[in-house]
Amino acid sequence: MKVLVTGGAGYIGSHACVRLIESGYEVVVIDNLSNSSKQTIQRIETLTKTKITFYKTDIRNDVELEEIFKRHQFDVIYHFAGLKSAGESYSEPLMYYDVNVAGSLSVLQRAIKFEVKRFVFSSSAAVYGKSEQQPQTESAPLEPTSPYGLSKKTVELILGDTYRSNPKFCFIVLRYYNPVGANASGLIGENPQTIPTNLQPILGEVALSRKQFVEVYGNSYDTPDGTGIRDYIHIEDLIEGHIQALITHFDDSGLFTYNLGNGNGFSVLEMIDMYSSVSNKEIPFQIAEDRHGDIPVSIADPTKANTKLNWQAKRTLEDMLGDDWRWRKNNLE
């Protein structure tokens, strides 16, 4: 069984590659390495003792993408490639629509042309935006506040229209909350090549004394400690959800949408406290103004995935941040 993993050198894609190989799948990776490293591919190979077919190319490169699909007969596509910073998407909206929407269209067009009927899409809880429903079910209104969230919603709509015109296909949409943690080996974890915007790598940078403090964006939200609350999920729990979704729907046709989250929320200050505990380091922070588009609370209702996929997030916040710290202190360079 051959699987194409777009963005397979990235944080989520690399963990997916490890689990897919361990589950017996043959993996082919496409990644332009804009926010990842070829070394990650080498580490996946070390972990799995398996040579990976890797193409350094962009999903928007139609010529190269076409050649890859001609060369391989894929059974499944896991589509992770894309840009993911909501904040950056406000200043670079066209880039986000180009990569996330046009890039996805390019991959999807090849899936249809070469009849790769199983397509798993990496979506985001950002599609819910300011939805007041908490926790959020899959039926909550889709009201994204950022170009990033809107780009994910747009691809979801495209997949729905594509399924209605190609009813033999299986499209699985997985809406992530906030993946954190690292592989237990300490060999792969979140390692952005650009300035980190997610809380987890920033906490790590401060713990390693590479950054002076954590900026906490807003402390006057209607939450217990005034800071924003998010649903965090261990990267390994997230990937187990991917595998379970494929197993569940392998022989199905349809459009299937699931939240992949913990079902619990943690504030920014709780995250700082826990990272300080697992690293045994003081994590200084400063309060800054709210960021444009940020929302007070975002928590998943994972009941549908729990029930339909026989999946649930099992790892604790201490597990998540402890694994991240192990990864960072073992990879100081």
Image (cartoon, rainbow, N blue to C red):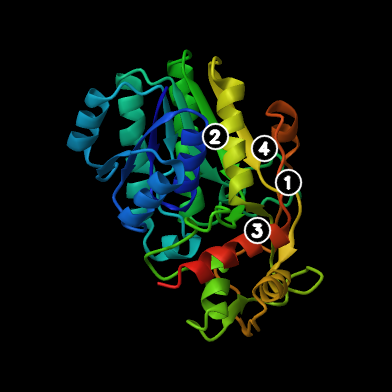
Residue 197 visible here: no
At x 36%, y 61%, the residue is 92
Q: Residue at x 52, y 38 (%)?
A: 19
Provide the residue designation for mark 3.
Answer: 320
Task: Please tell me whether mark 4 sits on a helix, a strand or a loop.
Answer: loop
Nearer the camera: disc 4 or disc 1: 1
User: Which image quarter is the C terminus in?
Assistant: bottom left
Please give the residue where the numbered disc 1 appears in the rendered image.
314
Q: Earlier in the sequence, mark 1 or mark 3?
A: 1
**Residue tagged 4:** 138
Mark 1 residue type: Lys
Residue located beneath label 2 in the image: 173
Q: Which mark is residue 65?
A: none
Element at badge 3?
helix
**Foreground tag (3 vs 4):** 3
Relative to residue 230, is residue 142 depicted above or below?
above
Observer-nearest residue: 55 or 267? 55
Check if mark 4's residue and mark 1's residue have beta carbons within 8 Å. no
User: In what element is the residue under mark 1?
Assistant: loop
Marks 2/3: CA distance?
24 Å
User: Do the CB atoms of the residues marked 2 and 1 lie less than 8 Å apart?
Assistant: no
Residue 272 against residue 150 in the figure, above or below:
below
Name the foreground residue: 221 vs 169.
169
Asked whether, in this view, residue 217 is left or right of residue 32, the answer is right
Q: Earlier in the sequence, mark 4 or mark 2?
A: 4
